[in-house]
Amino acid sequence: MTATTAGNQKPPTAPASGGGHPQRWLILGVICLAQLTVLLDNTVLSVAIPSLTRELDASTADIQWMINAYSLVQSGLLLTAGNAADRYGRRKMLLTGLALFGIGSLAAGLAQSSGQLIAARAGMGVGGALLMTTTLAVVVQIFDDTERVKAIALWSTVSSLGFAAGPLLGGLVLDHFWWGAIFLVNIPVVLIGLVAVAALVPESKHKQGARPDLVGAVLSTIGMTAVVYAIISGPEHGWSSGQVLVPASLGVVVLAAFAVWELRTPYPMLDMHFFRNQRFVGAVAGAILVAFGMTGSLFLLTQHLQFVLGYGPLDAGLRTAPLALTVVVLNLAGVGAWLLSRLGTPWTIAVGMALVAAGLAAIAVLGGAHGYGGMLIGLVVMGAGVALSMPAMANAIMSAIPPEKAGVGAGINGTLAEFGNGLGVAVLGAVLNSRFAALVSVPAASLPAALAAADGPAEKARISDAFATGLETSQLVGAVAVLAGGLLAAVLLRRAERADAPLAGA
């Protein structure tokens, strides 16, 4: 493994045979704490919207940019951040990310206007991109092959915990303090993280990382930001509108230029030849489709819980928590790592994705007939599938990339998750809207607008039934897509294993 030791750091930068870094589990705890803080800020702001609207006189557009500035900057910089970590040092970038995230949190908590809060959230996104990539890269560096899958499973558990805990933490803080406190609570965590990372995490970087790929960094950042912006804007402006098609087209063109540049430059930030590796391609397909199914289904579920079953936003969030809690419990128990050791990567991913698809189908069929009780079964089954498949696919992606490129591998993993999230909302949302429009003749783009235009209780009931039918159809489409993606990923990974077997024997 090509890694260097910085300063007077004595701990090894590469996992030693038979266990890895001697303080690896303590380091993993520090990393997960930093990761959790970043992920909480993806969801915590949603419960503060009424307070922000009232106290900052924020418009709807201001609120959208407060939420999107963070995820937009973070998504656009993931590949660049991962490459910087490989070239300049993962520990150094982890410390930089924590510092930027803490400064951005302080600025957000003390913001006096919508513009200041939007700028602070963008700054937090820069720190978040560095943290998202360096945390996984450090996990790969300090754990050996025997424990890496379990470590990645625990690392990925934080994503589910952050999803579940964000709205709850935000609501708890807002019950006792003003809205700025939801950002200031990050400061103590950042300070603890800075001290712990400086004391515990060994430095590691690519020996040949002295020459940065500045053109690649600019192209990837512009391309990813444009694509993610188009995905975020789609539900509001319509997928065929110029506000979506123009940035989407720009993003595709720039990313194509990025791919051409990376094939020609002698020091690429992303080696495009990775995409010739069947193991890598199989894991990529699976990662996109797991994110597709989970995020798309939750996007639909929250609408069903609020618009059809009549729950408030916080109650709806609480009722989606069983999915995240199932992931947390199974990963903490090491079920995914145990099954991977018994079945291997292809079969583990196939079983996990089949469970995700079965959960989606159960939500579609049982949720409509039995209300939340039917949904609960589907959420638990989906959670089990995510707990099995996500760590296996993250490990497959990282294993297909040379260790000295661990930061780029983590950036790819994060970028795929963001892309899958946006794709799930876009595709399943489009299926829902088209099915809903085919069943009702009310010229409205959303259920609340259609109900407001309805004549009488009978018409409202018919519109609600049509919306529920559209939800069922879109969730079944998502189930089929996830199952097909799981089988494709398993086949590609199995072929890669067979192709590697003669080389391993030799």
Image (tube, rainbow, N blue to C red):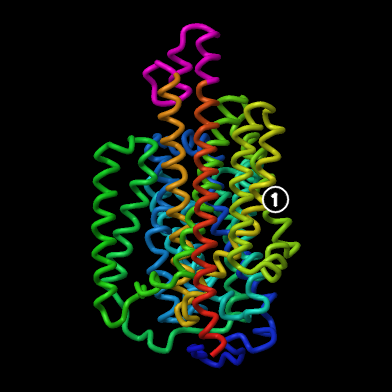
Kindly indicate the quadrant of the structure image that contains residue 189: bottom right
Query: Percent from the top left, x then y, of residue 41?
Result: 53, 52
Residue that sits furthest to the top in the current view: 456
Inspect the image, locate mark 1, and give the three-letter code of the amino acid beneath it: Leu
* Residue 294 higher or lower than 53, as above or below: below
The one nearer the camera, 237 or 169, is 237
Q: Residue at x 62, y 56 (%)?
A: 352
The one nearer the camera, 274 or 303, is 274
Residue 450 appearing in the image: yes
Name the side, left or right, on which 494 lies relative to 221.
right
| Magenta-span inclusion, residue 309 | no
Residue beneath disc 1: 325
Kindly indicate the quadrant of the structure image that contains residue 29: bottom right
* Residue 74 higher or lower than 456, as above or below: below
Query: Percent from the top left, x then y, of residue 416?
Result: 45, 59
Helix, strand or loop at mark 1: helix
Q: Which portion, as a residue range, is magenta?
A: 440-465
Q: Residue at x 50, y 35 (%)?
A: 474
Q: Which residue is drawn at 54% across and 68% down?
A: 494
